[in-house]
Amino acid sequence: MIRLVLPAALLATGFALAADIPANERRSGFDFMSSSTQQMQRDDTLNPAMLWVAEGEAQWSEAPAAAAKSCASCHGDAVGSMRGVAARYPAFDERRQKPVDLQQRINLCRETHQQQPALAAESRPLLGLAAYIGLQSRGLPVSPPQDARLQPARSRGAALFNTAMGQLNFSCAQCHNDNWGHRLAGSPIPQAHPTGYPIYRLEWQGMGSLQRRLRNCMTGVRAEPLPYGADELVELELYLNSRAAGMTVETPAVRP
Amino acid sequence: MAALLSSATAQPLVKYVVTGDAIPDSLTGSPGDAARGRAIVTNRQKGLCLLCHTGPFAEERFQGDLAPSLAGAGSRWTEGQLRLRIVDSRRVTPSTIMPSYYRIDGLTRVGAAWRDRPVLSAAEIEDVVAFLKTLRE
């Protein structure tokens, strides 16, 4: 099983290309959607995710409590300061000494710099901030950091991607590397590139994070989904991001 | 080649004998019911077959295309061959994506609702086999 771990050299470059799907065959989930759903994503006036973005933009410059600072009071205008940030997350956090994803980063700022309780996973304000920050990377290439400290976690993510799980005993790779483009019942199987998160998903009739998507896929194979915030989910995110290195950030995307 | 399979876990599975690429004997000792089998095959929460397979089910929209059509399966395979392919397809083709419907060992992270039970019961497998045998063309 050569695909268990990505070659270290590829991972170290930060331009790790997918080991299994050749770089020139990589395609965003966008390419597998109907033209009407694509149109919904392309046009900001039709894209329901822009509602969350607008709320996130408002929160950016609001103080969360009387004595607390707003995001803007430390980071200024997000249009400049947050450009490219979402494209490189998950990243290594010094304080925790482990990788954190963008939503965990937002909550670390809330706790340490704003003295506020963490926002709940999948809550509207957390998705709004993540979508607003994500928008500042739209059109930029996915750029995983060249940080050797991320490598063990990324390799664990790669291993998990290739581990069969659940009562139906599938690995992520069996669907997303070996069978992408085929139809699972009515749905085309995409390649699992995390280029558009958080997304507005028609099936959810709402916004959701990449972790929500990963938990859905785990439930689909009748596996016990990893809890929100679990290190293993961040490791999977890290691996998926390196697998998608160089692809274009679409946040906030629409998916069926 | 004959092998016995049993499991030490909570709900023991019925033991069965594999001969060649088939399980010749019914898991329950009696034949299944083809009408019930059809209902299982077309049920997306139960049989899950149409997630991957197409078949002669004009009323069913959204059939998968990950696997060969089930049409004609009953003339391509004997009853015993069909039984092994449902019970433990990976035993026939180790790399196949077709789930093993009657197996509870060697699995990882199985969800609480599904733990220690096979995807289909022995009786349900017999129903599916009986139905597949009717798919002659």
Image: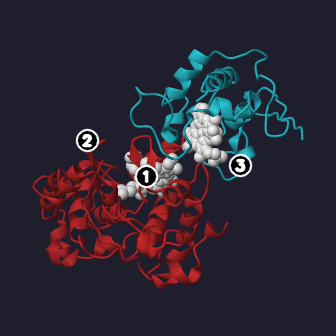
Chain colours: A red, B cyan
Residue hosting label 1 = A189
Residue B78 placed where, x, y %?
A: 74, 30
Instruction: Return the residue nearer the eye: A256 or B19.
Output: B19
Distance Cα–Cα, label 2 vs label 1? 20 Å
Residue A11 placed where, x, y %?
A: 52, 79
Left or right, residue A163 beside residue A40: right
Give the amino acid at mark 1. Answer: Ile
Residue hosting label 3 = B93
* For the residues bearing labels 3 and 2, Cβ distance under 8 angstroms: no
Viewer-nearest of discs 3 and 2: 3
- B35 w.r.t. B11: above or below: above
Instruction: Return the residue nearer the eye: A187 or A146.
Output: A187
Q: Secondary structure at mark 3?
A: loop
Residue depicted at x 20% and y 63%: A132
Residue hosting label 2 = A205
- Give the chain of mark 1: A
- Give the chain of mark 2: A
Give the amino acid at mark 2. Answer: Gln
Left or right, residue A245 beside residue B34: left
Label 1: how many Cα within 10 Å (few below 14, some 14–19, many 20+) = some
Residue depicted at x 16% and y 64%: A60
Q: Secondary structure at mark 1?
A: loop
In the drawing, what numbered circle is on residue B135?
none
Say whether disc 2 or disc 1 marks the residue closer to the N-terminus: 1
Residue A244, image quadrant: bottom left
For the C terminus of chain B, which image quadrant?
Answer: top right
For the N terminus of chain B, which image quadrant?
Answer: top right
